[in-house]
Image (spheres, rainbow, N blue to C red):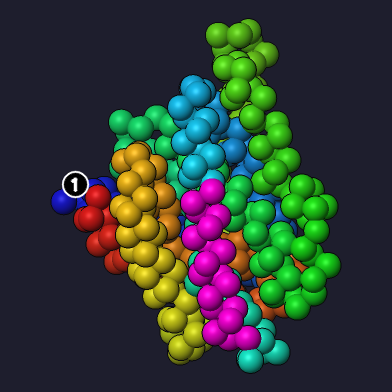
Amino acid sequence: MQAFLTTLILVGIMLLTAMPGYILVKIKAIKPESISAFSKVLMYVCQPALTVYSFNKADFTKQLGINLLIFLGIITALQLVFIGFFYLVFRKKSDNIDYRITTVATTLSNCSFLGVPLLEALFPQYPNAPAYSMMYFLSMNLLGWTIVSAIITRNKKYISVKSMILNPAVLSMAVALPFFFTGFKISADNGEFFGRLEDMINILGKMTTPMCMLVMGMRLGATKIKKIFTGWMQYFAVGINQIVFPLFALGVLYLLNVEREIMLCMYIMCACPVASVVQNYAEILGEGQEVAANTVLLGAMCSIATLPVLALLV
């Protein structure tokens, strides 16, 4: 029951954080066409800082390194299974962008923007939990900049080594992992410069969740509310993403008999709402912006019910 209450309060506060963004768009202080600029700040500045922040909190051990690789392999396989399954289900209707967005929205989760604060609140006994979140985010972005982008655009050019390497998730990992593996902490213990650098990284990293919610509020302000609740496809995507996918993942993890820390962290992140990056990819690629926005917004609203209920299983 404590997990239910903690999750309910945290998700509720996060959704309230979206209100200033909604108001700013409604009073025309921010124009709808400017929202994509905020999304880029989120993806290219805040998220990389969150990656460094998460690994800077973890203490590297050989066992943790093995666990992170196991986590990365399992979550990548799970996402590939679901994306591949729904790609085949909707293949005959792939000329319709709504079906292509729904294909990827059934699987991609808000694993870092909302996942990190949730993990820190629910599992204080697992200080390495944020590092697992970054492995999830890395997996999602490796798929996002390649397979997901190819599905959305119907262009196979995105499935390339260049797309896998030259993206914010991988580049931020390239910065964070050397410090993580060597045990060097970006902190005041190693001099004033690193202490100030830690403060900057922490501030930018912790901006990720409120910035994500503000952008979501802006999108809500620029969207006709009726459209969010009248399309069956976004209900389908949200139901699969926020109920079926996490329960399926939990079942697989039980069968694999993985460590409890891995199981709980992955389950909670799978239960997070439809990833805001679904909308970000749609905006960057220039296709399916409306259905992507409606699905992400509906998922965020539904998470006030789905996340606390699923957290009861913890």
Of residues 216 and 243, the one drawn nearer to the viewer in this rendering: 243
Q: Image point 80% across, 58% down: which residue?
A: 160
- Taking the magenta stretch, the answer to whether it contains residue 83 is yes
Is disc 1 placed on a helix, strand or loop? Answer: helix
Of residues 96 and 2, the one drawn nearer to the viewer in this rendering: 96
Residue 274 place in picture, x, y as percent = 49, 66
Residue interval drawn in magenta: 73-91
**In the image: residue 288, left or right of residue 54:** right
Please determine whether, in this image, residue 10 is positioned above or below residue 91.
above
Q: Image point 36% across, 50% down: which residue?
A: 256
Q: Image point 66% across, 67% down: which residue?
A: 148
In which quadrant of the rendered view does residue 45 lie? Answer: top right
Please determine whether, in this image, residue 15 is positioned above or below residue 170.
below
Of residues 239 and 60, the one drawn nearer to the viewer in this rendering: 60
> Residue pushed farthest front?
256
In the picture of the structure, the residue carrying the numbered disc 1 is 2
User: How many numbered discs, if any?
Assistant: 1
Q: Kindly tell me whether residue 250 is visible in this rendering.
A: no
Q: Image point 58% across, 72% down: which residue?
A: 84
**In the image: residue 73, left or right of residue 29:** left
Q: Residues within 10 Å of mark 1 (few under 14, many from 20)?
A: few
